Image (tube, helix red, strand yellow):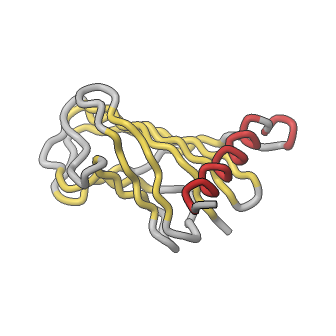
Amino acid sequence: MSNELILLRKIEELEKLIMRQPEIGGVWKNWTPTVTAMSGTFTTVSASGSYSAIGNVVAITIAITITTNGTAAGAVIVTLPFTVNNQTILVGRENAATGNMLQGLATAAGNKITIWTYNNLYPGGTGYKLYLSGFVSVG
């Protein structure tokens, strides 16, 4: 069995567990990520996030609204309320202007996610809405 197929099956198992959270005691918690740019600064940006842990696996969702981009460039960086164990890739979509697929990189022993488009370009702009989700390992 290929590694990709094994990974897809594990993701499906985790999604099933998350859907059962009320049964097993999982709770979604909200936090407000700090949003910065790899270079430059945003004029106006806001974000919200939620997460839920099952053991040391945490499901994350993040929504970022770039009202006015300013000089922000390179990548969008958001903070997490915890430190991740392993380097992890999260996925998402810009949903207001381009529809671009997004990738987020959470590095091992870090508490930030760096976000680019699928082809490693800056994912933001004035009026853009970025949505990202995935699973990370903690603890």
The N terminus - image quarter: bottom right
Q: Is residue 103 left or right of residue 111?
A: left
Q: Identify the residue at image location x=40%, y=51%.
A: 34
* Residue 16 x, y percent position in the rendering: 74, 39
In the rendered image, the vertical position of residue 93 relative to residue 106, given as above or below: above
**The residue positioned farthest toward the bottom in the image shown:** 109
**The residue positioned farthest toward the top in the image shown:** 96
Q: Identify the residue at image location x=68%, y=41%.
A: 15
Most foreground residue, 138 or 10: 10
Q: Is residue 99 left or right of residue 133?
A: left
Q: Identify the residue at image location x=16%, y=55%.
A: 40
* Residue 41 x, y percent position in the rendering: 19, 51
Quadrant hosting residue 38: bottom left
Most foreground residue, 123 or 2: 2
The C terminus - image quarter: bottom right
Number of marks in picture: 0
Quadrant hosting residue 44: top left
**The residue positioned farthest toward the left in the image shown:** 71
Q: Identify the residue at image location x=18%, y=40%.
A: 69
Q: Is residue 96 left or right of residue 137?
A: left
